[in-house]
Amino acid sequence: MPMSNKTSGDICAPERWGLPPEAIASLGKRLWDFWDRYRDCFKTKTHESAGHAWTYLRGLLGMKNERNFANIARRVTGPEEDGQNLQQFVSDSPWIAQAGIQQVQREITATPGLQHGGVLLLDESADEKAGPKSAGAGRQHNGRLGKIEMSQVGVFLAFYKEVVWTWVDGELFLPKHWFTPEMASERKRVGVPEERQFATKIELGWRMIQRVQAHGLPFEAVACDDLYGRSGCLRHQMDQAGIIYMAEVPEDTRIYLTKPDFGVPPPTPGQVGRFPTRPRVLSEDRPVEARQVTTLPDTHFQRFPVRSTERGELDDPFAMRRIWTIREDELAEEWLVIRHEYDQRYTYALSNAPADTSPERLAWLKCVRHFVDRANQDAKSETG
C-alpha cells in the first residue's frame, strides 16, 4: 500500500516514499513478513507456489525496468534461470487470485485506523495490446490513450483512507464477442471459466461492491467516474443498499431543479386501449442539463480546501444544489455537485448523501476519485 504522494526522484530512493534513511535497515524483514502473511494464498491441494511469489515480489520491487519473467528470475534466483517456472506460476498455476485479494481486505478490516472514513473508488484501467490473443483483448476504449484501440480492460475497486490507497478487487472485462461460439476455443485456451457469462463493466463493478460489502470491508461511500455514474440502475442499486455514492456524470445529464409531480398517469374518461403503466412527470416541470446550472443566478460557487497537492492547496470553487432525477422509473432526490476544476472546466457529480451533508464533505468526496488513478498508476507503473 503506497504511503506517500511523492512522485519525483529515483523509485528506490527512501525519501520518495517518506522513509528516513535509517528505516532501510528493517525493510528486508518487513518485506519478508509481508510475503509470509500472504504465502498461504498461493497454495493448492497438491502444490506450494509461495516461493515463486517471493521471487516475483522481490523482482517487481527491486528492479527499475525490463521486469519480465526471465530477467526477474535471473536477478533474484540466479543467472541460470530462464523464467519458465515463474511464468507458469503467474499464468497457469491454479492458485486463486481472490485469496490474495481477500487477504488485503482482511488486513484493512483488522487495522483500527482504517475502520472509519474509508471510501471505495470504482474505475477501469486499460492496457494496449499488440493483437487479439490476450484474454479479453479487443478494440475498445483505452482511457490511457484516449481512443479506441486494441486493448485489455480491467474493472477495479480501490480503497482510500488518508495516506493509504490500494486495490481491493478487480475483474477482467470480456467484450461480447468473446462469448460467441466462434471464440469457444480461445476462451478455453486463455482459461476463461466455462461458467463465465458476459457482464458489462457496470455489472462487474456492482458485483465487486457487493463482494467487499459481504466480506465486511469498512467503507463509508463509493466514488466513480461518469461511465458508472450515468447508470441510473447502478445509482439506484447503491441507494437501495444504503451505500452513499458520489458519481461523476456527463454535462448533459438531465435534472429537475424543482420537485416534479411524478407517477402513473390516471386513465382519462372514455379512454380505450392499453392504459399507461409506466410512471412519468405529470406536471409542467421541464428538465435542464447539468451544465446549464452553472450559469443560473442562484447557483453560488464557493472555494473549499480539499487537500494538499504538489501544486499547493486544492481549493477549487464548488457549487452544490439539491435536485431531482428520474432513476429506474423512480423520482430520486440527489445532490448535484459542480466543481470548477482549476478555474478552467466544469465537472459534475450526483450524490445520494443526506440533505444535511456539509458542503466541505461533498467537495472532498467529489475530488477523492484521484486516488484510484494513483492506485492504478502505482500498480501498473511503479511495480510493472
Image (cartoon, grey):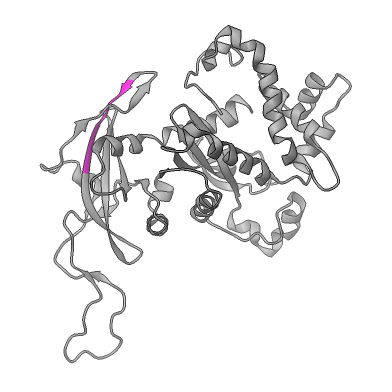
Res. 372 visible in picture: no
Q: Is residue 148 above or below residue 287?
A: above
The majority secondary structure of the magenta stretch comes to strand
Res. 322 visible in picture: yes
Residue 353 placement (x, y as % from top left)? 31, 48
Between 250 and 377, the residue placed more toward the observer is 377
- Name which residue lies at 26% across and 40% down: 338
Residue 97 placement (x, y as % from top left)? 68, 44
- Name which residue lies at 60% across and 7% down: 22
Residue 339 placement (x, y as % from top left)? 27, 36
The N terminus sits in image quarter: top right
Residue 290 placement (x, y as % from top left)? 25, 48
View extreme (right): residue: 80
Between 305 and 348, the residue placed more toward the observer is 305
| Horizontal side of residue 340 vs 223, given as left or right | left
Q: Quadrant of residue 232?
A: bottom left
| Horizontal side of residue 194 vs 79, given as left or right | left
View extreme (left): residue: 297
- Name which residue lies at 69% across and 17% down: 28
Q: Is residue 125 above or below residue 382?
A: below
| Residue 216 belongs to the span the image colors magenta | no
How many marks the image carries: the answer is 0
The span shown in magenta is 313-320
- Name which residue lies at 30% across and 86% down: 274
Q: Quadrant of residue 224?
A: top left
Q: Is residue 209 above or below residue 106?
A: below
The C terminus sits in image quarter: top right
| Horizontal side of residue 71 vs 346, given as left or right | right
